[in-house]
């Protein structure tokens, strides 16, 4: 296995039965089953690349002369930013925005695309944007940054917003503009390993690259960049590398979470994805304010949305914006795995005064107005 040690530096982990042998140093993959580390050639039956990903740095003029931050060094700060400007309105940018706003920093989020959380439906983005703005976070979309400079400890950004040139100044700049696969200088050029323009390794359903015996797992594949998916991919890739019986991963059931407050979480398809895949689908949305558990907690931020296929009533996915809303995901994921219908979810007993009762109420919402229900009604 080859892992990243630091930028452009890698280590090789070699299985030397009955123990693992760790060799540190500059590593380069020179063939489909050979790695060169510090001049030493190590040969194996197969190679597993797990070098991860790093922050993607956008090609903005002047950025190379500015002391910018990324998620790799943001949390090393010794003093609180007076005004933190964040480029990027996705997971990393929004989680950091809320955290530093609650610490006491002024925070401005500048997003290039028309909405934050660009891969999610508009109602999800609007809901979390509302709550972040209520905490004093400034969020602007459709912002193109043309130039960055730094003078006397102040960072300035020249941008175009709604067709007009504007200037933003702050004490610190955080780049949260995506990820780049750690593959630079890793492969000998003659191997012709397929790599995307963002540095990610292209792999098939068995996590094998286009070069036989070279497999990849984790963030370096650019798929689902989560710890739990990386762990499973590592296991499956290793098994596939050493076995004739190949295994695959069902990514349709990957639950995901953005750890803002309220959390944004989901699993399966949303309405747009369901329609794109040819489903005749519909959704039901239950405001959190209708869930007794959240009422008791004096909490009304967010909603639970369930998506089903009309003809079969089969549960296709869920999107949740709610405090600790991610705790509801696994019931949905397990239900989807075993083909549960909305009616079956509705008829299951959910304890009164639990957050999970919200799933039952959301299922009821497909056919009834929950405003007209009594306690524990079905």
Image (spheres, helix red, strand yellow):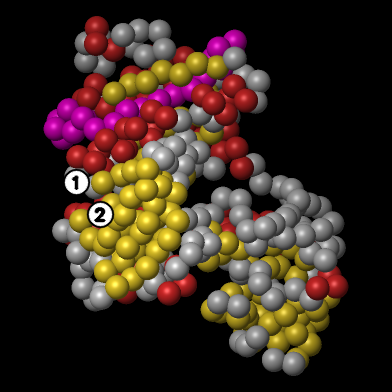
In x, y percent, where is residue 310?
A: 55, 12
Examine the rendering and report whether any part of residue 24 can be seen: yes
Tell me what residue is drawn at x 56 percent, y 50 percent: 224
Q: CA distance from mark 2 to mark 1?
A: 8 Å
Viewer-nearest residue: 176 or 193: 176
> Residue 13 lies in what quarter of the image?
bottom right
> Looking at the picture, does residue 5 appear above or below residue 374?
below
* Quarter-of-image position of residue 74: bottom left
Residue 242 in sight: no
Q: Residue at x 49, y 22 (%)?
A: 307
Counting residues from the start of the chain, the first of labels 2 and 1 encountered is 2
Residue occupying image coordinates x 73% and y 54%: 203
The numbered mark at residue 273 is none
**Within 10 angstroms of label 1, few (less than 14), some, or many (20 or more) residues?**
some
Query: In percent of the image, x 61 and y 42: which residue is there?
Result: 251
Side (left or right) of 151 relative to 181: left
Q: Is residue 209 above or below residue 343?
A: below
Q: Nearer the viewer, residue 366 or 168?
A: 168
Q: How many marks?
A: 2
> What residue span does the magenta drawing correspond to?
293-313
Asked whether 18 or 154 is in front, the reply is 154
Secondary structure at numbered mark 1: loop
Q: Which mark is residue 136?
A: 1
Q: Residue 174's spot in the image, x, y percent?
A: 37, 62
User: In the drawing, what numbered circle is on residue 107?
Assistant: 2
| Residue 297 drawn in magenta | yes
Q: Are marks 2 and 1 in contact (CB under 8 Å)?
A: yes
Residue 240 screen position, x and y as percent: 76, 58
């Amino acid at each position: 296995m080859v892992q990243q040690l630091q930028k452009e530096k890698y280590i090789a982990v070699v299985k030397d039965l009955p123990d693992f042998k760790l060799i540190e140093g500059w590593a380069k993959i020179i063939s489909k089953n050979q790695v060169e580390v510090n001049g030493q050639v190590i040969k194996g039956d197969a190679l597993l690349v797990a070098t991860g990903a790093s922050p993607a740095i956008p090609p903005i003029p002047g950025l190379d002369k500015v002391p910018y931050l990324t998620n790799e060094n943001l949390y090393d700060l010794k003093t609180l930013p007076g005004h933190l400007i964040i480029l990027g309105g996705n997971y990393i940018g929004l989680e950091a925005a809320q955290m530093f706003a609650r610490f006491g920093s002024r925070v401005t989020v500048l997003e290039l695309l028309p909405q934050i959380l660009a891969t999610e439906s508009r109602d999800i983005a609007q809901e979390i944007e509302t709550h972040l703005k209520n905490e004093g976070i400034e969020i602007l979309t459709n912002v193109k940054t043309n130039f960055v400079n730094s003078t006397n400890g102040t960072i300035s950004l020249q941008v175009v917003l709604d067709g007009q040139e504007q200037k933003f100044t702050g004490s610190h700049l955080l780049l949260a503009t995506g990820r780049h696969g750690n593959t630079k200088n890793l492969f000998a050029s003659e191997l012709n390993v397929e790599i995307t323009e963002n540095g990610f390794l292209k792999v098939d359903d068995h996590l094998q690259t286009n070069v036989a015996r070279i497999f990849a797992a984790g963030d370096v594949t650019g798929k689902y960049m989560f710890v739990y998916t990386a762990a499973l991919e590592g296991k499956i890739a290793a098994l596939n590398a050493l076995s004739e019986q190949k295994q695959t991963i069902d990514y349709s059931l990957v639950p995901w979470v953005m750890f803002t407050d309220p959390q944004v979480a989901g699993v399966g398809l949303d309405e747009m994805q369901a329609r794109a895949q040819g489903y005749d689908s519909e959704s039901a949305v239950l405001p959190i304010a209708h869930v007794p558990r959240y009422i008791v907690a004096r909490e009304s931020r967010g909603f639970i949305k369930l998506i089903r296929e009309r003809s079969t009533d089969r549960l296709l996915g869920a999107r949740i914006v709610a405090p600790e809303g991610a705790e509801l995901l696994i019931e949905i994921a397990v239900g989807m795995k075993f083909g549960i219908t909305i009616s079956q979810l509705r008829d299951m007993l959910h304890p009164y005064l639990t957050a999970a009762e919200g799933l039952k109420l959301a299922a009821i919402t497909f056919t009834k107005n929950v405003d007209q229900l009594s306690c524990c009604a079905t």
